[in-house]
Image (cartoon, grey):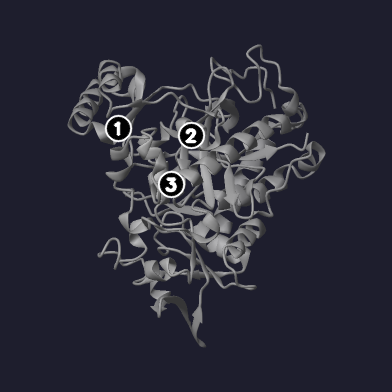
């Protein structure tokens, strides 16, 4: 397959330099591509698509009239990250998670960081994600954020930036795992030849982390799912199966004497640890949202009594609010007395008058984000938006400035992607997964999300994005 006409444009390309030279860590992969005909590449892509359907690797898109289930398109050109580069990311992510965990423990207990005015008190205490029932909580082993998916992007210079922290119910790890199994079939020899670090032991590591949260020798563990219509149900069932634990929904569980039991054909069995995949406020209708049909009445009381561990802990959502995100560099310095290893994307807080005025005057050049939205919703990319959209978001910001932040439009890095016209650069982000149990561990792989439309910067699966396998090298 010919790559001589590949255009990396003005963006940082993961595979090629500005001069069109292949980066060293991609050279062996490029040799393989050059030996493979376009027809063969198309066949490999077709096979990957079919395998995804056969494996049930689908997700649900809400507000979509074209059908419920879709596959997350897996492009067969991987993203490759050399070891030295990965070690830098690993150190930065561990630092960030450690600081965020200390922050969560503080704001629900002593509130030192608020008293010292490092983070505005009203930003936290008035946040809809700051859960008053969690005040005074001390989760098992002192850990709040057990599973994190942190989104990173790369700018024109090749520098990595943290784009977003996902501390509630981060999704996508099953696609990382299954994508590797599919891509292994496309390049069976090359993966070993290059020395790609494995990710297949993630379920074992996840199980070990969940077991660590209980003081019992053989704790009973369950994955709490909202059910089959949830967008990430494939992942819930996949992880439960891989760990060999129970997949349960709210109707399967009952609380007695502040202990949580699973209803089985043999009677009630106590559950010691829940990996919850439902939002905080839906977990217990007696404490949070009384209309929730997904949660378990009495679950929170059992948690407070120390009779069950929950990952992630209730209340973690306040730390991944997009407005709080802007303060994370200060949070790191406050708790760890260290400079952040990985920088945030420069962020304007519309709640602050100076920032708000700048945003309103320069809205055509900025990305506007709703602080509590996710999945690519509630945002506007200024340079690609219409005059009407600019006016709409100006009014939204003026009416509710606390609800919006703004960031410069980054030219996300690109990776060659198989299209009908051959290989073409498409924008990507990176979501590594971090487990916090006995220690903080960054899984040596990630979900690379790719914007499949030419020129698009929106990589979210719900907005038409796809994915790539991410190869982290031993060297």
Residue 404's label in the rendered image is 1
Residue 334's label in the rendered image is 2
Label 3: state its secondary structure: helix
Task: Give the label, 2 or 1, closer to the camera.
Answer: 2
| Residue at mark 2 to residue at mark 1: CA–CA distance | 25 Å
Residue at 40% x, 51% y is 109
In front here: 407 or 380?
Answer: 407
Residue at 34% x, 72% y is 297
205 to the left or right of 101: right
Q: Residue 77, percent across and down?
A: 64, 35
| Residue at mark 3 to residue at mark 1: CA–CA distance | 25 Å
Q: Tag 1 or tag 2, which sits nearer the N-term?
A: 2
Q: Residue 459, percent across and down?
A: 47, 35
Q: Residue 305, percent across and down?
A: 43, 70
Residue 240, image quadrant: bottom right
Label 1: state its secondary structure: strand
Label 2: state its secondary structure: helix
439 to the left or right of 271: right
Mark 2 crowd level (few <14, some 14–19, many ≥20, 10 Å Cα)? some
Which quadrant does the N terminus fall into?
top right
Total numbered labels placed on residues in the image: 3
Q: Tag 1 or tag 3, which sits nearer the N-term?
A: 3
């Amino acid at each position: 397959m010919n790559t001589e006409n590949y255009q990396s444009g003005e963006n940082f390309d993961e595979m090629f330099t500005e001069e069109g030279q292949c980066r060293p860590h991609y050279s062996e992969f490029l040799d393989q591509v050059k030996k493979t005909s376009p027809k063969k590449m198309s066949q490999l892509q077709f096979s990957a698509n079919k395998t995804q359907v056969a494996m049930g690797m689908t997700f649900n898109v809400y507000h979509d009239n074209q059908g419920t289930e879709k596959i997350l398109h897996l492009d067969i050109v991987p993203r490759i990250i050399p070891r030295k580069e990965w070690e830098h990311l690993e150190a930065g992510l561990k630092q960030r998670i450690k600081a965020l965990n200390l922050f969560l423990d503080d704001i629900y207990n002593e509130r030192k960081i608020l008293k010292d005015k490092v983070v505005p008190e009203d930003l936290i205490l008035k946040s809809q994600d700051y859960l008053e029932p969690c005040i005074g909580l001390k989760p098992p082993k002192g850990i709040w954020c057990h599973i994190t998916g942190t989104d990173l992007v790369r700018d024109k210079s090749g520098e990595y930036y943290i784009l977003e922290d996902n501390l509630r119910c981060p999704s996508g790890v099953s696609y990382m795992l299954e994508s590797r199994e599919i891509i292994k079939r496309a390049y069976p020899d090359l993966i070993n030849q290059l020395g790609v670090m494995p990710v297949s032991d993630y379920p074992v590591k996840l199980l070990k982390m969940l077991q660590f949260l209980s003081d019992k020798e053989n704790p009973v563990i369950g994955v709490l799912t909202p059910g089959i219509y949830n967008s990430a149900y494939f992942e819930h069932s996949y992880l439960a199966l891989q760990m060999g634990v129970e997949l349960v929904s709210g109707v399967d569980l009952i609380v007695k004497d502040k202990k949580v039991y699973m209803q089985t054909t043999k009677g009630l069995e106590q559950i010691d640890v829940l990996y919850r995949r439902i939002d905080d406020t839906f977990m217990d209708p007696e404490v949070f949202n009384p209309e929730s049909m997904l949660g378990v009445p009495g679950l929170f009381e059992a948690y407070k009594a120390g009779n069950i561990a929950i990952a992630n802990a209730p209340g973690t959502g306040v730390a991944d609010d997009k407005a709080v995100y802007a303060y994370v560099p200060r949070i790191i310095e406050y708790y760890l007395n260290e400079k952040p290893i990985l920088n945030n994307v420069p962020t304007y807080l519309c709640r602050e008058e100076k920032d708000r005025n700048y945003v309103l005057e320069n809205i055509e050049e900025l990305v506007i984000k709703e602080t509590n939205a996710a999945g690519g919703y509630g945002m506007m990319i200024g340079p690609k938006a219409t005059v009407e959209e600019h006016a709409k978001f100006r009014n939204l910001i003026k009416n509710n400035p606390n609800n919006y932040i703004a960031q410069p439009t980054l030219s996300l890095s690109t990776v060659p992607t198989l299209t009908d016209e051959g290989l073409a650069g498409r924008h990507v982000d990176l979501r590594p997964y971090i487990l916090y149990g006995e220690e903080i561990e960054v899984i040596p792989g990630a979900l690379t999300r790719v914007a499949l439309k030419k020129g698009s910067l929106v990589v979210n699966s719900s907005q038409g994005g796809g994915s790539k396998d991410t190869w982290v090298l031993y060297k």
